[in-house]
């Protein structure tokens, strides 16, 4: 005789949530032990020339040990022209393969999968380094980005072909390194977004105009990757559900709406030979009120944005806005208003639409949703409702590397240990090690004690050291 569950008993509900979250997720060519993915968190942990460093190994191992099913790497440039910040490990040459092999071996010890994010900045190049001093960012357009004013040049056919090949070779190197798959970064304003988005792409040739034409560049990337790695190597893509390209300046074109994104996903399935999973985000720039959703820490911007001043035509204006008490408060208010009230699961509705669309096409493709997840009821609720098959988590995992274990034991972190979505980690990353910089989360009776404990945690990425 079946026993009916008392829905007022939250222990039953939590048990169901845990079973769902920690049920394996099977893609076409990859199985992940649970539904929790570490999102593509970037940090300047590596050598200036793009070779991986010891801190990067420590960084990735923290999350594998913490229990996530898979790690999506930080932004990994396929060429030096495509990096957003210096001291990011790249995948632009065969001499990078040994490092990524070491990463794979490190995380695999914890039964964790590793998916390398193949990336290219296009015009959205924050601090490209001395190699790019006299280069404009390669893009679908000659127009500078509207937030920082970073300069761009519309790519020629030869440049397009060269970059497509760089993506394909990056995927081949990832496979040779023993990694479990690759992700194309097609969201949040980087090069692929610059081709996909109707708000950015103003080309008149075969790569611009219609949805099909704007998708052509990344479809050629997908096919080039498949020629290099075959059809049985996991390939996923991060994509905007909606661009919200007019988020700051209402006179800008809004960019892709959900229907256009759904059409682009259908094209990229390429009759079962293309994309295996879509990682759904939103926002046509980085940062954006919807990515990562949360606050805009004006004080941190004043402290660390100064390195951007020489990069774009609008950076001095931005810095002035951040620096002044009234305009800084107004900008912060405007940012939060444009974000909306929802943070945890902010992209779930978009993910649901895309998942329904690719499911109707009987593609077998899965959908991962990003957006501030840190509570078991929210994660399980999104999966149970059919919004997604798994979730990717960034800042809450920085705050609590052992979040998967916390979710097994209870609904989420204790209130004073939760990620506050303050986004101080985002602004500090311009000049400092990536980590949680929200002082209220750390123990101590005085400011000095709290600060000391915060810095100790931030610097833990350098332990164990390179030489012992």
Image (cartoon, rainbow, N blue to C red):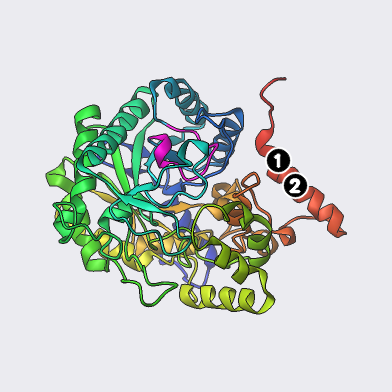
Q: Residue furthest front?
A: 134
Pointer 1 and pointer 2: residues touching (CB < 8 Å)? Answer: yes
| Horizontal relation, residue 288 to residue 171: left or right | right
Q: Main secondary structure of the magenta part?
A: loop
Can residue 360 be seen here?
no
Circle 2 residue: 455
Q: Report the front residue among 11 and 142.
A: 142
In the rendered structure, which segment of residues is drawn in magenta? 79-90
Q: Secondary structure at mark 2?
A: helix
Q: Report the front residue among 71 and 268.
A: 268
Total number of numbered discs in the rendering? 2
**Residue 378 vertical placement versus 90 (above, below):** below
Where residue 281 appears, as percent x and y from the top left, is 38, 59
Q: CA distance from mark 1 to mark 2?
A: 6 Å
**Residue 6 vertical placement versus 409 (above, below):** below
Image quarter (top left, top right, bottom left or bottom right) of the N terminus: bottom left
Where residue 237 appears, as percent x and y from the top left, is 31, 47
Q: Residue at (45%, 33%) from the top-left corner?
A: 90
Q: Secondary structure at mark 1?
A: helix
* Residue 89 is one of the magenta-drawn residues: yes
Circle 1 residue: 459
Image quarter (top left, top right, bottom left or bottom right) of the C terminus: top right
Where residue 384 appears, as percent x and y from the top left, is 36, 62
> Residue 345 lies in what quarter of the image?
bottom left
Q: Report the front residue among 11 and 77.
A: 77
* Residue 387 is one of the magenta-drawn residues: no
Where residue 145 appears, as percent x and y from the top left, is 40, 60
């Amino acid at each position: 005789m079946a026993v009916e569950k008392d829905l007022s008993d939250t222990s039953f509900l939590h048990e169901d949530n845990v079973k769902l979250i920690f049920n394996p997720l099977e893609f076409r060519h990859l199985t992940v032990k649970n539904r929790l993915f570490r999102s593509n968190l970037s940090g300047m942990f590596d050598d200036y020339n793009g070779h991986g460093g010891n801190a990067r190994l420590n960084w990735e191992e923290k999350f594998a040990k913490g229990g996530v099913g898979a790690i999506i790497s930080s932004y990994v440039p396929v060429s030096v022209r495509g990096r957003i910040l210096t001291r990011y490990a790249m995948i632009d040459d065969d001499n990078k393969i040994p490092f990524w092999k070491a990463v794979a071996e490190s995380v695999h010890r914890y039964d964790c999968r590793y998916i390398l994010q193949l990336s290219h900045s296009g015009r959205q190049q924050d601090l490209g380094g001395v190699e790019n001093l006299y280069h404009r960012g390669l893009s679908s357009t000659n127009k500078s980005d509207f937030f920082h004013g970073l300069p761009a040049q519309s790519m020629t056919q030869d440049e397009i072909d060269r970059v497509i090949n760089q993506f394909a070779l990056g995927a081949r190197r990832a496979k040779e390194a023993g990694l479990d798959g690759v992700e194309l970064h097609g969201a949040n304003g980087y090069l692929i977004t610059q081709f996909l988005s109707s708000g950015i792409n103003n080309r008149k040739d075969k790569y611009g105009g219609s949805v099909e034409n704007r998708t052509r560049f990344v479809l050629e990337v997908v096919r080039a990757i498949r020629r290099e790695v075959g059809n049985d190597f996991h390939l996923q893509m991060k994509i905007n559900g909606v661009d919200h390209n007019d988020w700051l300046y209402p006179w800008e074109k809004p960019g892709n709406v959900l229907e256009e994104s759904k059409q682009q996903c259908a094209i990229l399935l390429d009759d079962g030979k293309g994309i295996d999973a879509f990682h759904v985000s939103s926002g046509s720039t980085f940062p954006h009120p919807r990515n990562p959703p949360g606050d805009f820490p004006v004080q941190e911007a004043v402290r660390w944005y100064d390195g951007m001043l020489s990069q774009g035509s609008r950076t001095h204006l931005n810095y002035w806005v951040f620096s002044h008490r009234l305009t800084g408060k107004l900008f912060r208010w405007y940012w939060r208003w444009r974000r909306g009230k929802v943070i945890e699961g902010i992209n779930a509705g978009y993910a649901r639409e895309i998942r329904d669309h690719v499911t109707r096409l009987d593609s077998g493709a899965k959908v991962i949703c990003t957006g501030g997840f840190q509570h078991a009821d929210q994660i399980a609720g999104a999966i149970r409702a059919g919004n997604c098959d798994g979730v990717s988590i960034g800042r809450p995992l920085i705050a609590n590397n052992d979040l998967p274990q916390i979710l097994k034991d209870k609904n989420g972190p204790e209130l004073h240990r939760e990620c506050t979505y303050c986004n101080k980690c985002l602004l500090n990353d311009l000049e400092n090690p990536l980590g949680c910089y929200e002082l209220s989360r750390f123990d101590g009776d005085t400011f000095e004690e709290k600060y000391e404990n915060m810095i100790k945690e931030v610097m833990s990425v350098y332990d164990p050291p390179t030489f012992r």
